[in-house]
Amino acid sequence: MTSASWLAAMITPENDFDGAPLLRKEFTLEDGHGAVVKATLRATALGVYEASINGVPAGPDVLNPGWSSYEWRLRHRSYDVTALIRPTTVIGVELGNGWYRGRLAWHGMSNLYGSELGFFGQLDIEFEDGHVQSVASDTSWHAGPSATTFNDLYDGQAIDARRLQQGWAEPGFVPGTGWTGVREVAFDAGRLAEPVGPPVVRAGAVRPVEVFTSSSGKTLVDFGQNLVGWLRFTVQGEAGHAITIRHAEVLEDGELGVRPLRSAKATDTFILSGGQDSFEPTKTFHGFRYAEVTGWPGTLTADDLEAVVVHSDLERTGTFECSNELVNQLHRNIVWGLRGNFLDLPTDCPQRDERLGWTGDIAVFAPTAAYLYDVKGFLQDWLLDLAAEQKAQDGLVPITVPDVLKYCPQPAEFPAPESSALWSEASVWVPWALWEAYGDLGVLKNQYESMASHTRRVEGLLSPAGLWDSGFQFGDWLDPDAAPDQPWAAKADTAVVATACMYRTARLTAQAAGLLGKYDDEASFDALAARVRNAFAEHYVAADGTISSDCTTVYALAIAFDVLLTPELREFAGNRLAELVRDNGYRVSTGFAGTPFITHALTDTGHVDEAYRLLLEEGCPSWLYPVTMGATTVWERWDSMLPDGTINPGEMTSFNHYALGAVADWMHKAIGGIRPLEPGYARVLIQPQPGEGIEWANTSLKTPHGEVRTAWKSDGGGFRLEATVPDGVAADVVLPDGARHGVTGGTHLFDCALAPAPGYEVSR
């Protein structure tokens, strides 16, 4: 919005003011230059900031500048504040601890990036004659106390309304007792970066569905939806009176279930002034459906509170609906899980003492995310942090980005950090998912060095035989047959999983190299992929086709990643996978590695019925079991809550994890029938694959070329499909009877018999 040079300094208050200081700068416009034609505020902080001009928020965003790899990238945002400028103007800033100085991860550690908060900002005002007046952060600013007496993302916020200073960010306010000056702190402006992704915003509000009293006499509020954000309310009561609000995702024995939060207090405290007070704790966030309210003056009703939903400002692009209401609720849960965990970066969970950018979760969920929302900028921004962390760690892609764990003690059960299959694969799989979804070669160009660096690093970790069979691996994390306290104890051999993942990674990196004209790299990575594939066949595939571990995950990965050497081995793997699924009563038997790919593997080998029955199973473990238990987001564990209503005894139990919701990618492509034939949906395959238990489905996707829609229904032996394709886009339509039709822009209607023809198989 402006090309003016930076004149700002990083400033910090002389007094820390309980970790939530106010900063202000009052100035007058320079005379003799005519009217103001444009005013732009650029701002960032060490911590989080809220900026205002003459008491009016500069923008709708919150929790800025978010969490990036601060050592190398500190993002700043620009605001058009032209309409807010007055002859005498005040820049007001509120600071908080945020990710920079607050508690991070489960070790109880704070100040991992630094011990001082800071603000770096500049207001550039352009006049009619072209003159620019710049007002930047420097030692002429003042700092004072805010009404916030405590703030932490995990533990909550405390606000004392008696400390509120009316008009502090408006002209004419005279800083009184308690206000101090500021000082400069050392700061490398080379770390400043333009944001690629959208800001975090208030994305909506949810009213309570019930206010009730627990058996112990606690006042509980149910918002009917597991969400991420905070509560907002206006109240009046005796000065000094305290209202305390605790947050949690579930109830256990009719009381707030706080054990899954681990050490996160998730508690906000509000001290009343004696007048009418409006509270909104914007320096924290909680993952919750339920709130326990203590100290409310009078009788609390559903009209007194609202939950503010907070996440990155993303545009919804994909929809899905079908005849099975449990499946519809599952899909809604997946959407809400994305919303709650796409708060500036893709996190694993939004509620406990973690909330980290785990690479494995987004590695498998990226295709689903790119269908549901426009996440191109959001994930590109995160990938820049991934590349920065990777470059600083000799090519190692850490298991979390930003990698705060490098500052924390290493858990005894996890050896020294090393590349981890599927987790570190995010460096390759996420850019590829964005390329397929949006068709922007710039994504691959920007991330290619990161992709190639990871692939070469793992090449160096392979055994002489060509297997990735050494070092710690998460493997098929959270296999439902593993003990609650041993999430790594999966049926699938970790080396089989890792080697299959490496083959896919080498193939994708080779394809990216070819697309970018790096033909020597393409040949090198193709040769690496062939070496790994042959090693997999030699060491893990028996003569009869059995894959080592002989469990659902290894067959799902072998099929989905096309590791197997012959069509006969692929057919055997599909049949064996279907057999294992049937033998397990269509209950889920896969963890983080196998779950995103098992339904794809079944349909791609002609086992559509087994895929449907696996999706539609309601017994535990299954995708629909949590739905039958009242879930409104996707759980971390298949049995995060046990059938008797008690919380899983494992220490690691979240009720808002999106990873297992990666099945939505199959729902969109196989049930809905929409998938790209060329990146960015420049050409489209429309191929719904109906199955027992779903009689109709409606699906839509806003692609870079326009909206694609499918609507199909089956009645007995008949099948009818209505498909809409954007102008200028060609589509291949494949019906369940095997008939193929080529169409272009417009809406097209097709009818056929439902029974598939012999040898029916999904078009690849």
Image (cartoon, rainbow, N blue to C red):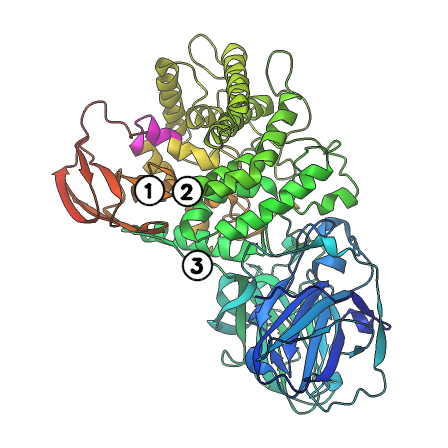
State the CA–CA distance, disc 3 to disc 2. Answer: 18 Å
Q: Is mark 1 on a helix, strand or loop?
A: loop
Q: Is mark 2 on a helix, strand or loop?
A: loop
Q: In this view, does 552 lie to the left or right of 229?
A: left
Q: Dot 2 corresponds to which residue?
A: 439
3 or 2: tag closer to the N-terminus: 3
Compared with 228, 168 (above or below) is below
Q: Give the range drawn in magenta.
A: 601-608
| Residue 292: percent from left, percent from top | 61, 70
- Residue drawn at (61%, 57%), measured in percent from left and top? 194
- Residue drawn at (41%, 43%), measured in percent from left and top? 437
Q: Residue furthest top?
A: 543
Camera-side residue: 535 or 745? 745
Residues tagged 2 and 1 counted as in contact (Cβ below 8 A): yes
1 or 3: tag closer to the N-terminus: 3
State the CA–CA distance, disc 1 to disc 3. Answer: 20 Å
- Residue drawn at (37%, 17%), measured in percent from left and top? 572
Q: Dot 3 corresponds to which residue?
A: 315
Q: Which of marks 3 and 2 is in front?
A: 2
Q: Which amino acid does label 1 sit on?
A: Ala
Q: What residue type is labelled 3?
A: Glu
On residue 682, the disc is 1
